């Protein structure tokens, strides 16, 4: 959905698209970040209209770099935003904490999208806590319209108080659809300027650091007051109150309408600093209060502290008493059960037998699919070659530790390859591999890492391997794209976020520059050569790098850069199912006691031809 439109236009947008529109309306000069669900759509949306808006939009090599690039822009007086998923904030945290102390000149937003229920994997990290210990203002929208409004307001508040503002969403808010009314677009036309001020922009001594810290605390307090319009208090005659924030607010509204409830509510939009005055006003009116917040009991802890200061007895329902769980995200049933507990009512809707039958029928029709690679994925060739090399050297799967990494590469942990042993964080495959080898364990170590992950966080660990002469094989699985998050470009893709030609940064050149002496580049579709590369690397006494380069199958399809579908000669096919059992490729379809290739799915990679023991797979006409 395009986010270009005149003031007053109403469009149905995702939460992330609304955030992108907010950046346009606020006159942001630059938006940067690293791909990561559920934050990715902000930059994708802005990149699609960058030529129309004149905004600089770019993916960064990682979140730390994104934060630093955005800050460099903001320190010249222009407006900038850095985007990331929850795990990305961990990567950026060192710089974020230091930048918070120095503050900003132009408006500066750090957008982080959390993921209760881990729809996109990783930890159920609650980054509201990060804002608290970083002493940064944080806003959290509950719907797309508010998300857009908060971005516009956050830029103003950031500039006024000279402090970066964090904007937090969750998967539900980021991927929620809602009507968004467009506002006016600011044309700032500013000239970037920057003056040397080491007392503000360096951390050269404890006195300056403490001075910056004290200043940050005061600026954040003022920012909280400036954003107080997003904290909405509605008092009634009820002795029950509900305090909530973010996506659960929508569930609460639905429950109140459905059951005709008239409880007092406080919808919090400013997570840090929390609106103490409005919380106190609600607590003064009620005998019991329900705190609806996903993940950690941040608001609940604050409410309990205030009640202690007030000396008033109010029954608090939330995570501490077990009314809600600190695990997962909320749904309508969870919210209604919690409300029912507080009100002493059964708010659980009666089950419609006919509706339940339809639900059960739908479940019975769902297909169970293994999590595996796309048809023609070059990573199939990589893992096939890796395992073949191990067998050639008389290693079993238990004899070689294969550390996995974030992205499509980790799918090698699943059948039929059953290769990867670990998955920790971006780039961790190499660092873990170094540790396994340095432990003295009598097993060879292979680190399997994608190209974007290598650029993001793998290089320091590779340098560590060279420095300490660690005997490790690093398999850089280079499909020239960030595939799992939606096919964004990498530094090796040869083009920028907005499609302009750019120098391709090659993983093999980086490896050689880091001091790796054994570096090989192979095509994973060429199983024989890739297998030999692994055999040599496993026997090499020192760190070695194999770059397995072949374009992502989905990207190849989109670029019409694929081969002709293969066919199976039914007269030669013995029905041994070796191709299916070895690759589990979705283009291979068992039909009776034999196998056929689905021409609508096959891209002609020929990996299956390499595993067929009777050479029944090749080009030609499918036998009927």
Image (cartoon, helix red, strand yellow):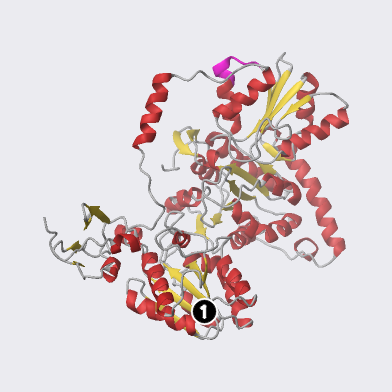
Quadrant in which residue 555 is drawn: bottom left
Please state, as top left, top right, bottom left or bottom right, where the N terminus lies in the image: top left
Report the front residue among 368 and 94: 368
- Position of 605 with respect to 18 (left or right) is left
Which secondary structure lies at badge 1? helix
- Position of 68 with respect to 376 (left or right) is right
Residue 258 is a magenta residue:
yes
| Residue 280 higher or lower than 465, as above or below | above
Q: Position of residue 7 (x, y in %)?
A: 49, 35
Q: Position of residue 4 (x, y in %)?
A: 44, 43
Quadrant in which residue 186 is drawn: top right
| Residue 311 higher or lower than 126, as above or below | above
Residue 322 is a magenta residue:
no
Does residue 154 appear anywhere in the picture? yes
The residue lying at 43 percent from left, 54 percent from top is: 486
- Number of marks in the image? 1
Q: Position of residue 233 (x, y in %)?
A: 70, 25
The residue lying at 48 percent from left, 20 percent from top is: 351
Segment colored magenta: 256-262
Please state, as top left, top right, bottom left or bottom right, where the C terminus lies in the image: bottom left
Q: Position of residue 69 (x, y in %)?
A: 60, 61
Determine which residue is flagged by label 1. 511
- Position of 82 with respect to 133 (left or right) is left
The residue lying at 54 percent from left, 51 percent from top is: 121
């Amino acid at each position: 959905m395009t986010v270009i439109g005149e003031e007053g236009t109403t469009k149905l947008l995702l939460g992330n698209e609304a955030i992108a529109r907010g950046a346009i309306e606020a006159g942001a000069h630059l938006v940067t970040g690293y791909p990561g669900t559920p934050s990715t759509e902000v930059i994708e949306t802005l990149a699609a209209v960058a030529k129309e808006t004149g905004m600089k939009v770019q993916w960064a090599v990682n979140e730390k770099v994104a934060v630093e690039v955005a800050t460099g822009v903001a320190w010249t007086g222009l407006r900038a935003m850095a985007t990331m998923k929850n795990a990305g904030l961990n990567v950026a945290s060192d710089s974020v904490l230091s930048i918070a102390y120095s503050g900003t000149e132009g408006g500066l937003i750090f957008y982080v999208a959390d993921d209760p229920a881990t729809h996109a994997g990783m930890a159920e990290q609650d980054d509201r806590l990060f804002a608290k210990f970083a002493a940064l203002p944080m806003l959290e929208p509950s719907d797309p319209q508010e998300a857009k409004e908060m971005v516009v307001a956050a830029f103003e508040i950031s500039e006024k108080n000279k402090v970066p503002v964090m904007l937090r969403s969750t998967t539900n808010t980021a991927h929620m659809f809602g009507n968004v009314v467009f506002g006016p677009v600011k044309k700032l036309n500013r000239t970037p300027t920057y003056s040397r001020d080491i007392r503000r922009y360096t951390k050269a001594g404890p006195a300056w650091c403490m001075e910056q810290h004290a200043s940050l605390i005061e600026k954040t307090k003022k920012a909280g007051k400036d954003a107080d319009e997003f904290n909405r208090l509605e008092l009634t005659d009820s002795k029950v109150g509900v305090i909530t924030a973010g996506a659960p607010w929508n569930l609460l509204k639905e429950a109140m309408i459905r059951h005709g409830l008239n409880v007092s509510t406080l919808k919090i939009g400013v997570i840090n600093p929390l609106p103490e005055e409005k919380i106190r006003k609600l607590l003064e009116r009620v005998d019991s209060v329900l705190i609806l917040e996903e993940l950690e009991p941040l608001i609940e802890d604050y409410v309990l502290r205030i009640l202690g200061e007030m000396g008033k007895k109010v029954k608090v329902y939330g995570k501490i008493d077990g009314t809600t769980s600190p695990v997962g995200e909320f749904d309508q049933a969870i919210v209604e059960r919690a409300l029912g507990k507080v009100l002493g009512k059964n708010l659980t809707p009666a089950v419609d037998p006919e509706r339940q039958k339809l639900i059960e029928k739908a479940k019975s029709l769902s297909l169970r699919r293994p999590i595996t690679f796309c048809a023609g994925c070059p990573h199939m060739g990589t893992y096939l070659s890796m395992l073949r090399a191990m067998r050639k050297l008389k290693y079993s799967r238990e004899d070689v530790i294969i550390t996995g990494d974030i992205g499509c590469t980790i799918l090698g942990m699943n059948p039929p390859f059953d290769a990867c042993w670990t998955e920790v964080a971006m780039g961790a495959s190499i660092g873990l591999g170094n540790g396994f080898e340095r432990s003295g364990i009598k097993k060879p170590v292979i680190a399997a890492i994608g190209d974007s992950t290598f650029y993001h966080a793998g290089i320091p660990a590779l340098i560590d391997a060279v420095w300490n002469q660690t005997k490790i094989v690093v398999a850089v699985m280079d499909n020239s794209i960030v595939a799992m998050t939606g096919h964004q470009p990498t530094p090796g893709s040869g083009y920028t976020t907005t499609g302009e030609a750019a120098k391709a940064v090659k993983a093999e050149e980086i490896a050689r520059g880091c001091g790796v002496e054994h570096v090989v580049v192979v095509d994973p579709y060429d199983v024989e050569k890739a297998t030999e590369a692994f055999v040599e690397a496993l026997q090499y006494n020192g760190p070695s790098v194999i770059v397995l380069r072949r374009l992502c199958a989905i990207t190849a399809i989109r670029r019409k850069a694929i081969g002709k579908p293969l066919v199976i000669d039914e007269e030669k096919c013995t029905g041994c199912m070796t191709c299916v059992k070895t690759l589990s490729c979705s283009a291979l379809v068992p039909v009776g006691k034999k196998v056929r290739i689905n021409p609508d799915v096959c891209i002609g990679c020929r990996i299956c031809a390499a595993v067929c023991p009777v050479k029944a797979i090749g080009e030609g006409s499918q036998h009927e």
